[in-house]
Structures are given as C-alpha cells and as structure tokens.
Amino acid sequence: MKSLTEYVWFELPERRGFVNLTATVNELVRKSGVQEGLCLVNAMHITSSVFINDAEDGLLHDYEVWLEKLAPHEPTGLYRHNRTGEDNADAHLKRQVMGREVVVAITRGQLDFGPWEQIFYGEFDGRRRKRVLVKIIGD
C-alpha cells in the first residue's frame, strides 16, 4: 500500500472566498503513484470548508449570497460566540453547512469524478494562514 500526506496552505486576503483545488489534488495523486485508492481532502480549520461542486463563477457567487443570508456576518452581536472577543460565529455556521471534507475515489491513477465535479476550498474567516490536508492511500 502506498500513501501520501501533504498540506496545502492558504491565506486569502478577503474574509470569504473560494479556491479550486482540483489541479493541485490531481498533481498530488500523480505524485503519490496510487493507481487504485482513495483521496481525502480535509479543511484543517473550523472556519473553512472543502466541498465538491461545479466550477462555475455564477454558482460560487450564489453560494456567497446564500451563505450570507443563512448566517450573516453582521450584526456581530447576533451571536453568543462573538461575546468571547471573536467576530467569526457566522464563519463557523457557514463551514457547518458547506462541510469539512471530501473523499474521492482514485481509479487508474486519476480522481474519479462525476460530470463537472471539482474540489473547492471555502474560506469564511480569511486574512490568516490556514491549511488543507490531502491524504492519499491505495495501491
């Protein structure tokens, strides 16, 4: 069995944003040499997310609008968590909706996606350094 563990680091300049990780993860699958196995991509911070969806700018914009309606950043006093001195309670809620990780099958040395599927990192409390774990296992 082969395995590869890599950390991909981010520091988005804005509070919220999305990064397409698909090319990076594809390269790590190639580097691992795994032909048949699994690839875990996991957000290592409680205010960020990893998810799979279509790489379409309008959809990413729609996520931004929808998430802000579900858990608006302001007024920050709306959230009990923010009484601790933080102002990121909304980011924790957004992460809960968007998910923590994805697992993708590796078949014949390639990520085995459905049509249009791509892997995204979602940032909901940016402007600081964060990481994503990529763990690949298989033969």
Image (tube, rainbow, N blue to C red):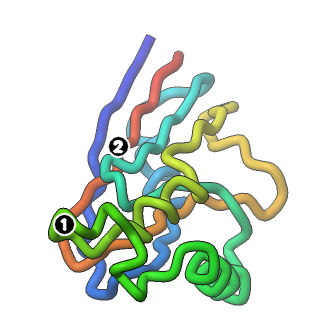
Q: Is residue 2 left or right of residue 68?
A: left
Q: Is residue 49 left or right of residue 11?
A: right
On residue 14, the disc is none
Q: Residue furthest top?
A: 1
Q: Position of residue 94 (x, y in %)?
A: 51, 65
In the image, 22 versus 128, the foreground residue is: 128
| Residue topped by disc 1 | 129
Separation of residues labelled 1 and 2 (CA atoms): 14 Å
- Element marked by disc 2: strand
Q: Give the residue type at disc 1.
A: Arg
Q: Give the residue type at disc 2.
A: Leu
Residue displayed at 29% across by 41% down:
6
In the image, 42 versus 16, the foreground residue is: 16
Label 2 Cα neighbours within 10 Å, binned few <14 / some 14-19 / many ≥20: some
In the image, 15 versus 52, the foreground residue is: 15
Residue displayed at 47% across by 63% down:
121
In the image, 86 versus 103, the foreground residue is: 86
Q: Position of residue 79 (x, y in %)?
A: 39, 69
Mark nearest the camera among 1 and 2 is 1
Give above or below for 44 relative to 119. Answer: above
Residue displayed at 32% across by 47% down:
44
On residue 133, the disc is 2
State which quadrant residue 61 falls in: bottom right
Q: Where's the N terminus, which quadrant?
A: top left
Give above or below for 133 relative to 137. Answer: below
Give above or below for 135 relative to 51. Answer: above
